[in-house]
Amino acid sequence: MEYVYPAVFHANDDNSYTVTFPDLPGCISEGKTLANALYMAQSALSEWIGYLKDRKQELPASSHIDTVGVEEGEFSSLIRADVKDGRAIKRTVSLPKWMDDKVAERGLSLSRVLQDALIQRLQM
């Protein structure tokens, strides 16, 4: 599921950035460059939302970007997070016996092999 929240980027004296999310108190990140700060902000937002969802806490509403106050040396930007449901589910799959035997011989996890193959096939 996709989420979008405004973030405030504060330019530090060493040209790095500190990133905060006004709607998510405590969700803070940093980046050595602007590009790194954007990446880190997206990562922090994804992790924060995942944390709240795992604990079945309600997500705060996202403020409109125009209502986010910034001070000198700061700017605001929208950050998008794509949070995937990582819960394991059970599926019944069919495969030839010889494949199952080879998986067992090599000590592989059939679930891990299937996940890796699907990630590659889905190009994730």
Image: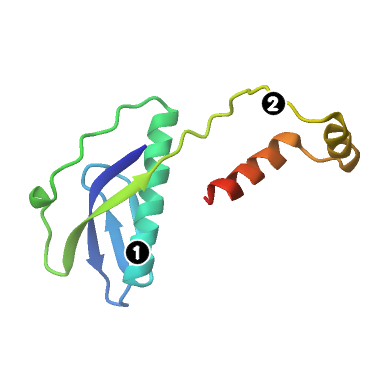
SS label for mark 2: loop
Residue 67 position, x and y percent, is 8, 48
Q: Check if mark 2's residue and mark 1's residue have beta carbons within 8 Å.
A: no
Q: How many marks?
A: 2
SS label for mark 1: helix
Tag 1 residue: 37
Instruction: Tell me the amino acid under the disc marked 1.
Output: Ala
Q: Residue at x 35, y 27 (%)?
A: 57
What label does residue 70 carry, if any? none
Tag 2 residue: 93
Quadrant in the rendering for residue 30: bottom left
Q: Is residue 7 above or below residue 103?
A: below
Q: Residue at x 54, y 46 (%)?
A: 122
Residue 60 position, x and y percent, is 24, 34
Q: In this orientation, which residue lies closer to the viewer: 17 or 85?
A: 85
Residue 4 position, x and y percent, is 26, 45
The crowding category of the residue bearing disc 2, from other C-alpha atoms within 10 Å (few below 14, some 14 to 19, many at least 20), is: few
Q: In this orientation, which residue lies closer to the viewer: 18 or 116?
A: 116
The N terminus, quarter of image: top left
Q: Residue at x 12, y 59 (%)?
A: 70
Q: In the rendered structure, which disc, 2 or 1, sits on the residue that comes first in sequence? A: 1
The crowding category of the residue bearing disc 1, from other C-alpha atoms within 10 Å (few below 14, some 14 to 19, many at least 20), is: some
